[in-house]
Image (cartoon, rainbow, N blue to C red):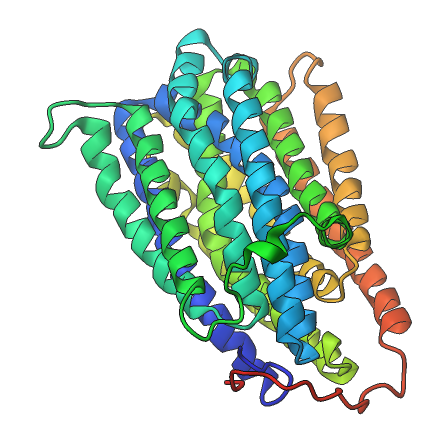
Amino acid sequence: MNNLTSGSLTRHLFSTAGFMLFTMAFQTMYFLADLYWMGRLGKEAVAAVGVAGNLTFVVLALTQMLGVGTTTLVAHAAGRRDPDAARRVFNQAQTLSGVAGGVFLIIGIALTPFYARTFSADEYTAGLAQQFLWWFVPAMALQFALIAVSAALRGMGDFKPGMVVGSATVVLNMTLAPILIFGWGTGNAMGVAGAAVSTLVAVAVGVAWLYVYAERPGSFLRVRRAEMVPDLATWKRLLGIGLPAGVEFALIAVYLGVVYVVSQPFGAAAQAGFGIGQRVGQAGFMPIVSLGFAVAPVAGQNFGARRPDRVRATFRIAAGLAVAGMFLLFVICQSFAEALVRFFSDDLAVIAVGEQYLRIVSWSYLASGLVFVTASMFQAMGHTMPSLATSFVRIVVVAIPAYVLSSWPGVQLTWVWYLTVLSVVLQMALGLWLLRREFRIRLSAGRDALPVPPVPISEPLA
């Protein structure tokens, strides 16, 4: 267990974010490599994987319900020096992840044909999306178990296993993908399905690896069957914190769904251009996402240890880092948007849409950085409803007008990109206002120096 309640907050943020960034850098390499290989199969393949990839945000929504609550409750227990409580939360999270993953697998397989047909621009793209989803849905079902373990480790301040396992499995995924897609050395080219199979294999290896790590001698988070019996009170606490965060990701999936519906009349090239632009943007966001993952346990442990001074300072430092990082990404997208998209496709129509997307939406990147940090602070304090409220405002501003405009003659995709920028700026402003209010309510004056009751632990704090 890593003690984040003393010492330099900047050092804690950099060290914890560094572990996450290392892992995410490998993940980003995989996303971009996967996109590159899909580009070699044609714009329909890129569009199909983009349509199927929208399901990733549905999975993120569901796993966030579990992961955010697990990280927060474990971090609070670690801040109180209560390893028994941390272990009980860990075991309940494993049971809940098994139930949720099983339900998702059944529903996902049943709805695959309908989903592919609904969001694809044509029948050929829909067929490719369906081939991909038959293997991708089981991979996403395994993500529930993966998130349950890694979220608990983050709450304890233990980022190293996630870094090692995440990086190794991404390398495995990147190695397998072209072999399975093109049949290198096997003579059996699986096409888009090969990319999904490689993901399934990599996630399965990652889940097994993390469980072996959790069972190491002396670990606080070992699986105990007696503590895995469903405890509805703990499930309620986990989901009470995680549900709003999960709904936030579900709203992102709604936004993406609206974009794909609006872009259908423009054909597969428009959907492919949007898919490439979105993935390039996601790749650039990885440093800030890793910072957000670091903010939650650092601020969460200090919140549990009753150190409001350090909670506030965590936000100030993280916000400054986020603004600096997103400004750099903004400059890159403004300067090299065409080159970034052209690397993944030589189709002029695809390049035009992707370039427009990056040049316009990048104006919201600084605001997006503050949104990430603000959301992580709400998670750290165990109250995620304000963050959900800001996400709902964002979707209302962009999704409803975009859907209405889709029936207008002469509609242009750039209208959706401008609505996106406006919605993110409004989300940032509302989030900062609500966070200031939350600080005033939950971090009352005079509590900065309250002692933490000592609890004996069997493993020294790092």
Q: Nearer the viewer, residue 209 or 7?
A: 209
Q: Looking at the image, which residue is at 64% across and 60% down?
A: 89
Q: Nearer the viewer, residue 162 or 437?
A: 162
The correct choice, above or below, for 356 with respect to 205 in the image is above
Q: Looking at the image, which residue is at 54% across and 59% down?
A: 224
Residue 83: name its quadrant.
bottom right
Q: Position of residue 308 (x, y in %)?
A: 78, 80
Q: Looking at the image, which residue is at 55% across and 13% down?
A: 114
Tell which residue pokes out farthest to the front in this image: 226
Q: Looking at the image, which residue is at 32% across and 39% down?
A: 201
In the image, taking residue 128 as reference, residue 423 lies left or right, namely right
Q: Position of residue 258 (x, y in %)?
A: 64, 25
In the image, taking residue 146 as reference, residue 457 lies left or right, namely right
Residue 22: name its quadrant.
bottom left
- Residue 267 in sight in this render: yes
The correct choice, above or below, for 221 with respect to 367 in the image is below
